[in-house]
Image (tube, rainbow, N blue to C red):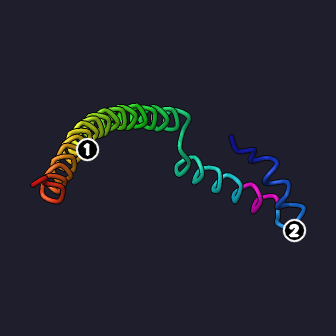
């Protein structure tokens, strides 16, 4: 809320006439009422922001789920590769052992 009387009084103290002070204060208050958001505008904007946050949170949760699934899949593949590398290495060692240490 704009206190036009207080505003006009300050203008009078600065040297404006009564008529100038009152006219300027009223004009400024009218323009401010037209330009400034109302309480309902602010409430509507806050509501919109809250919905946006909720939607963003839901998208982040879905993305977290996807990341967790991909991580689990990659962990499983890494485990398989580790086992395969271990068996392959054991096989190579066995072949080298047979080639180098053949009795006979």
Image spot of residue 59 (x, y percent): 32, 36
**Residue at point 17%, 48% (across, down):** 94
- Reply yes or no: does residue 73 show up in magenta: no
Q: Which residue is nearer to you in this view: 58 or 79? A: 79
Label 1 Cα crowd, 10 Å radius (few <14 / some 14-19 / many 20+): few
Between label 2 and label 1, give the one nearer the viewer. 1
Residue hosting label 1: 82
Which residue is located at x 19 percent, y 43 percent? Answer: 87
Kindly give the residue lying farthest to the bottom in the view shown: 15
Question: In the visual, does 65 lie left or right of 83?
Answer: right
Considering depth in this image, is 75 or 16 the residue closer to the camera? 75
Rendering quarter of residue 14: bottom right
Q: What are the residue bounds of the magenta stretch?
A: 18-22
Q: Nearer the viewer, residue 5 or 63?
A: 63
Q: Position of residue 35 (x, y in %)?
A: 53, 52
Question: Compared to 7, does 55 lie above or below?
Answer: above
Element carrying mark 1: helix
Are there few (<14), some (14-19), or many (20+) residues within 10 Å of tag 2? few
Q: Is 30 displayed left or right of 62 in the figure?
A: right
Earlier sequence position, callout 2 versus callout 1: 2
Left or right position of 47 against 25: left
């Amino acid at each position: 809320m704009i206190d036009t009387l207080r505003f006009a009084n300050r203008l009078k103290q600065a040297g404006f006439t009564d008529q100038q002070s009152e006219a300027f204060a009223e004009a400024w208050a009218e323009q401010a009422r037209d330009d400034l958001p109302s309480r309902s505008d602010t409430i509507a904007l806050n509501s919109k922001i809250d919905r946006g946050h909720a939607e963003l949170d839901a998208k982040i949760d879905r993305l977290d789920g996807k990341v967790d699934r991909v991580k689990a899949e990659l962990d499983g593949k890494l485990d398989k590769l580790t086992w395969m590398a271990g068996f392959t290495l054991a096989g190579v060692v066995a072949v080298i052992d047979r080639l180098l240490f053949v009795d006979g």
